[in-house]
Amino acid sequence: MENTVEQQNSTAQVITPSQLLEHWQGHRRVTRRVIEAFPEKELFTHSIGGMRPFSGMVSELLAIAVPGLQEIVSGETAKFNEDLNHGNSKATLLKWWDEATEQINELWAKIPVERFQEHVKLFGQYEGSVQSQIFYFIDNEIHHRGQGYVYLRSLDVEPPFFYDRS
């Protein structure tokens, strides 16, 4: 008996969930180094071409990762809120980043492998599989980190190597 494409897609696996988590956390480690590289004031004020300061982008990433995973785990719709009161403190952003990193690890352990193909609707509006939502979290982070690299270069600050995810 032949498997249909749908059956194959629901069981096919290229990498394990733990490998995907490590991939994401590797990107998060690089993004953390980008946050660290910013001079304190410019993290909250510097922009180019009408884009937000990097702190605003980091606030968005914080508003997506843990709340999105919490919604995946609990099934309860979360409200998207990126208006974080960081008080223009790099130390606060880094603290929240580190706390989110641990929360991601804890929530990830609650997602069984078969859930990655399930359809979800996050923040009441974004539809796709659990897997596609997680890819969006990662892709969005890479996108904003690239903007941060441009900002750092414009400030004559050498950004961290993007490929060093240790």
Image (cartoon, rainbow, N blue to C red):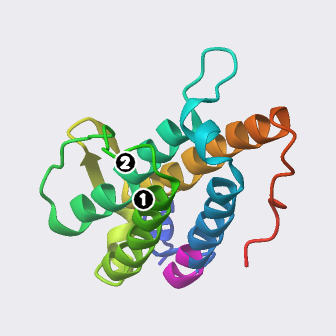
The residue that appears at 64% across and 41% down in the rendered structure is 143
Stretch in magenta: 16-21
Whether residues under marks 2 and 1 lie with C-beta atoms below 8 angstroms apart, the answer is yes
Residue placed most toward the observer, 17 or 2: 17
User: Mark 1 is on which residue type?
Assistant: Thr
Image spot of residue 43 (x, y percent): 60, 41
Residue located at (48% from left, 71% from top): 3
Reading the image, the residue beneath label 2 is: 86
Location of residue 67 (image quadrant): bottom left
Q: In percent of the image, x 24 and y 64: which residue is there?
A: 70
- Lower sequence index among marks 2 and 1: 2
Q: Would you place residue 76 above or below residue 18 in this image?
A: above
User: Label for residue 92?
Assistant: 1
Q: Position of residue 37 (x, y in %)?
A: 72, 55
At label 2, the amino acid type is His
Q: Secondary structure at mark 1?
A: helix
In reply to whether residue 153 is colored magenta, the answer given is: no
Magenta span: chief secondary structure: helix
Q: Which sits in the foreground, 12 or 106?
A: 106
Where is residue 44? Give x, y as percent.
54, 37
The image quadrant of residue 125 is top left
The reply, left or right, for residue 87 in relation to residue 151 is left
Task: Identify the element where label 2 is drawn.
Answer: loop
Q: Nearer the viewer, residue 64 or 3?
A: 64
